[in-house]
Every structure is written in C-alpha cells, then in structure tokens.
Image (cartoon, helix red, strand yellow):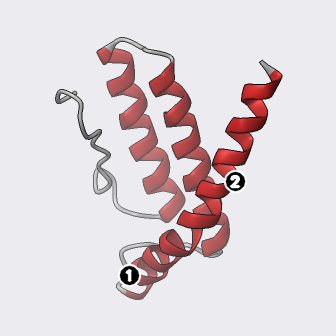
C-alpha cells in the first residue's frame, strides 16, 4: 500500500546516505588497484545500490531457492559489469540462510 511504499522509500534513502560513502571508498580503492574500471564512481555506486534494492525486494517475495539463486547470480554479474571487474569476482552471500 501507499504508506508502506513511503516507508520503503525513506528506508532506502537512509541506506543510500549510509552506504554511499563506504561503497565509493571501495570503488576508488578498486580503481587505484586496477581491479575496477569505472569512469564515474558515484554513478557506479548508485547502480550498485539499485541492484541491492532489487535484491531486497526479491527476498521479500519468498521466491523458490532456485529463483533466488538465479537472482543473486544476476546481481553479481550486474555489479561486475557496473564496476568493470572481471567475471565471477563478485560474490553475494546471504547470512542466516542455507547455502544457495
């Protein structure tokens, strides 16, 4: 409903404010070590946060383990592409969950 949407928007805004500087530092370090090839780090950080938001929505949809596993692999690939990183170098693990 509309009230929950407003709460979700406020939550993700706060997450963005909190995580953006931390993620930007990671991206800058990756660029400095030549692990990432990013022309505009703040934009890369924004896309990574959007990917995380999509994953959060997927978690609440209570998808089957197969679908969730596919979504995690897709998120990893999208983040690798966003960062200009080598394939299969980004791995997302859910804590408190059985291995997927």
Identify the residue shown where x is 22% and y is 27%. 100
Res 70 quadrant in image: top left
Give the side of residue 80 with respect to residue 42, left or right.
left
Residue 71 location (% of width, % of height) = 43, 29
Q: Secondary structure at mark 1?
A: loop
Of tags 2 and 1, the one toward the viewer is: 2
Distance, label 2 to label 1, CA atoms, is: 30 Å
Residue 97 location (% of width, % of height) = 23, 30
Disc 2 crowd rating (10 Å Cα; few below 14, some 14-19, many 20+) is few
Residue 98 location (% of width, % of height) = 18, 27
Up/down of 62 relative to 77, above or below: above
Considering every residue shown, the one lying at the far top of the view is 64
Q: Which residue is mark 2?
A: 13
Give the side of residue 93 with respect to residue 5, left or right.
left
In front here: 12 or 76?
12
In front here: 5 or 28?
5
Quadrant where the N terminus lies?
A: top right
Q: Secondary structure at mark 2?
A: helix
Up/down of 67 relative to 6, above or below: above
Q: Which residue is mark 1?
A: 34
Up/down of 82 relative to 2, above or below: below
Disc 1 crowd rating (10 Å Cα; few below 14, some 14-19, many 20+) is few
Residue 40 visible (yes or no): yes
Considering every residue shown, the one lying at the far bottom of the view is 32
């Amino acid at each position: 409903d509309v009230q929950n949407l407003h709460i979700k928007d406020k939550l993700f805004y706060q997450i963005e404010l909190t995580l953006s500087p931390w993620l930007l530092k990671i991206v800058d370090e990756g660029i400095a070590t030549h692990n990432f090839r990013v022309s505009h780090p703040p934009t890369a950080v924004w896309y990574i946060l959007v990917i995380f938001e999509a994953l959060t929505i997927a978690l609440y949809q209570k998808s089957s383990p197969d679908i969730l596993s596919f979504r995690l692999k897709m998120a990893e690939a999208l983040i690798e592409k966003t960062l200009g990183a080598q394939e299969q170098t980004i791995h997302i693990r859910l804590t408190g969950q059985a291995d997927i």
